[in-house]
Structures are given as C-alpha cells and as structure tokens.
Amino acid sequence: MKNKETPQPAHAERATKPFRGEIQLPGDKSISHRSFILSALAVGTSRIHGLLEGDDVLATGRAMQAMGAQTTRLSDNTWEVTGRGVGGLISPDAPLDFGNSGTGIRLTLGAMTGCPVTARCIGDESLSRRPMGRVTDPLTQMGAMFEFHGAADGQLPLTLTSPQRALPIDYVLPVASAQVKSCILLAGLGAPGVTAVTEKQSTRDHTENMLALFGADISSIPDGKGIPDGKGTPEGKGLGKGRRIELTGETELKATTINVPGDPSSAAFPLVAGLLSDGAEIRLNNVMVNPYRSGLWDCLKEMGGKIEAVNAREAAGEQVVDYIVKGSDLVGIDVPPEKAPDMIDEFPILAMAAACARGTTHLHGLAELRVKESDRLAAIADGLKLCGVSVTEGEDDLVIEGCGGPVPGLMNNEPVTTHLDHRIAMSFLVLGLNAENRITIDDARMIATSFPNFFELMATLGAEFNTTHPGA
Ligand code: S3P
C-alpha cells in the first residue's frame, strides 16, 4: 500500500463481459454534510443512519466536534450527534481543515456566523483555489469579519470572526448555488427576525427540507415565471423557476432521526457504465430522486438510455427509488443552460456518455464548472482529447462529437490529469471500460472524498479497475 500523500494512478480497460448484478448506493453527500451541521445546531441528540463516511463529510463532522458538538460513531454509517443549540457553537482550539470540500467549508462558515465563533479555516490545494467571496460577501453583510491569508483575496486559508449576534439579510443570489443559499440560511438561524434568500433558478432544496425536519420556521415560495427550458414547458417540474425562502431566526432546532438516502451523484457512475455496456442489466438500489438533481436522468433518457425507476419510497423527506439499467445505444443531444443547476455535478459523467454516443452533444451553461473541485470544463475537454475524442471547449459550453461506440482511448502513456477532482477521476475510469485502448488516470485518491467504496461496488457489477489505490 502506498502512502496517502503520493498520487495513486489507476487504469481501466474495455470490459469483456456485460455488467450484471445489483448494488446499494452509499448515503448522499449533501444530506450527510447537513446532517452533521444541523444536528450540531440542535438541542438534544440526533441519530443519523446511512451517513456517507467519505473524507469530505468526515471533515465536516470533525469541525462540528471541534466547535463543541459531540459526534459518536455507533457502527458503520450510523452516528449520534449531541448538539449545542442554535448559536451554541464555540471557537475551536485549532484550525478547521475542510480538505477538498466546498460544501463543508461554505455551509460551516454560515453555521459559524450564527454563533459567536472565531476560527481559522484551511483546505487542500484544490479547495484553496476555489472562490469563497460568494459566501463571505453575504456573511459580511450579516456581520462576520474575514481575513484572507491565501494566494488571492477570497481564498483559503481564512480567519472568520463572527458577530456577537448576526444580522438578518434579504439576499438575491447572483449565482445559482445551493451552497450559497444554504450558507445564508444557516447563518440566519442565529439572527433575529427573517432572513430571506431569493434564487432566480431553483437549486437542490435539501437544506430547506432538513431545516423543516429539525423544526425551523421556514417557508419556500415559488418566485417569478421561470426561465423556459427550451422545450416550451417553463412550468414543468419547476425547471429554471426561482424561489424565495424565508427563515425566522433564533428558533430552536430539535434533535431528530435522519435516514440518509443514497446519492444520485454517485449512482451516476455505475449508471452510465451500465448504459455503455452492451447487453448489461444492473440494479442500483437506494437512489434519491430530488427534482432539483434529476437533470442527468432526463438527459440520459433523451439520449435513448434504458433506465427504469422502481420501488419508490421515502427517506429524510426525499423520494428514493431503485434503478434498473440496461445497455443502450445512446445518441447525442443538446442540453440547454437552464438544465445546469439540476445536474451541476453530473456533467463530467454525462460527457463520457456523450463521447460514446452516436452524433453530437452540445452542453450549454457550464460557467460554474470552472470553479468546482477543478476547472471541470477544461479537465473534461483535455481528458477527452487525450482519449481521441473530438471536443470543442467554449467559455461556458462544450461540444462533443460522439464515437458511436467505444472511444479510441489513450495513444501513449500520458495519463488523464484529474486535478484532485473525484468526479473527473471516476468519469474517466468509467470511460476506460468502453475504450479501445486503456485509459489511465494520474490519481485516484480523491475518489474517497465522495464515494469511498466506488472500486468495490463497481467490481460487484463486473467492472474491474487496475489500481494501487488502497480503497480498491
Ligand atoms: C452542493 C451544491 C453544489 C454541488 C456540490 C454540493 C450542496 O454546489 O456542486 O457538490 O450540497 O449544496 P454549488 O452550490 O456551488 O453549485
């Protein structure tokens, strides 16, 4: 086993047999972060079942512990958290390390602003390049003070000094971002009166749903007529529609029990692997269906993907289903910009499906991909070119000429660069299962941030990767 500090290359080769079998998806990353944070702000002891024990979420758990909440691991994926109540977090003794996680740092900065806390926050190389101004600007309006110690203003490391009592604000989000929305709402918990956030395009609503579950005084009102989705159905599913969310602060949160549903963003990898495998039939159990995260499903269906959702049920206020996925001949499509917030994390794997589809796929509205764990737009384009796929990268769009079957794969020994980005790593490994030549990635370590048993579950379906990664 190699040292965790050293990059761990991995490679994938074309699968010889169709994938078969069934797997249980791990807990949702977004809901797992929120479970730790909201439990830490609640009065009493919450029980979390099915928590994703990925590096990102565990870093958030450690941050809550460092600020006075008591977090206890009872058994695999089951945790208990005794909270300190709204406004009750205390200053940590040492810097809080959020590793690779944008969600962890941004939501926690909000939670801290609603408590009288001073803390230094750090992250890895990737997180230290990402913009924090989108949350520190509104938090400054709420009374927080920030000192930046990084390469540029608005980047980690930073020191936050929270106000004694946060001020409520009425904020219109300049970017469609659930992280920014959630950050403000969490800060608003500690502010007197009503904190309001308006989003012009709705984003995942887990924070609102979970705040309601913990007994917060919160309401969400559809706002505006919405942006047409390009198909003449502005009303359908709320696509592109905005919302105004109002939260009354200084209301007690009560500890509760959370059953974390499976992560649709992780399900995306075996899902696409199954669709690209001739004659495959796989079952993916425990996949959350949230209307603001269903863009990939819609796109893959439109591309001709044979996917069926069965066994609908509920967990943590969300719908959960099982997917039955069959090998399919995919065709290229046009994805309009309004769709982007509903599938913001799924573009890397959608691009892999597009590379194997027949015809051209045009993805629009991708500006936000440039500030994810890596510049995902560039990482996808560079990686696909290296694998022999014809791609045109625009400022905020991507055109992919599908190969109508397996892609050529790597022509020499130069690996695909993953830039410390878990989703770029998993996407190119999945592409390698449908490539003439092997595809190597430079580093598989980051996969543990969101999908620690990726290698094990993919192997259950028959997709073996060759890797020295300790998790494999
Ligand atoms: C997340 C929101 C999204 C997403 C991230 C998780 C969340 O980020 O990319 O992986 O849990 O709120 P943005 O809000 O920046 O789009």
Image: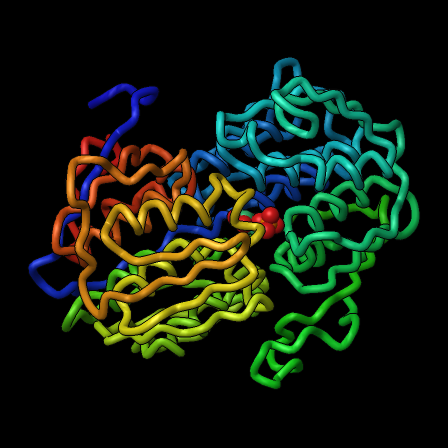
Q: Is residue 375 left or right of residue 232?
A: left
Q: Residue at x 67, y 19 (%)?
A: 120
Which quadrant of the view contains residue 123? top right
Front in this rendered view, residue 257 or 326: 326
Task: Using the rendered image of the protein, determine whether residue 102 is visible from the camera's viewpoint.
Answer: yes
Question: Extreme right residue here?
Answer: 193
Q: Position of residue 267 (x, y in %)?
A: 37, 58
Q: Residue at x 44, y 57 (%)?
A: 347
Q: Is residue 457 left or right of residue 106?
A: left
Q: Position of residue 20 (x, y in %)?
A: 16, 65
Q: Position of residue 213 (x, y in %)?
A: 67, 57
Front in this rendered view, residue 314 or 91: 91
Query: Where 392 falls versus 98 (above or below)?
Result: below
The quadrant the C terminus occupies is top left
Q: Position of residue 269 (x, y in %)?
A: 33, 56
Q: Residue at x 73, y 63 (%)?
A: 200
Task: Using the rendered image of the protein, determine whether residue 457 is visible from the camera's viewpoint.
Answer: no
Query: Where 187 falls versus 245 (above or below)?
Result: above
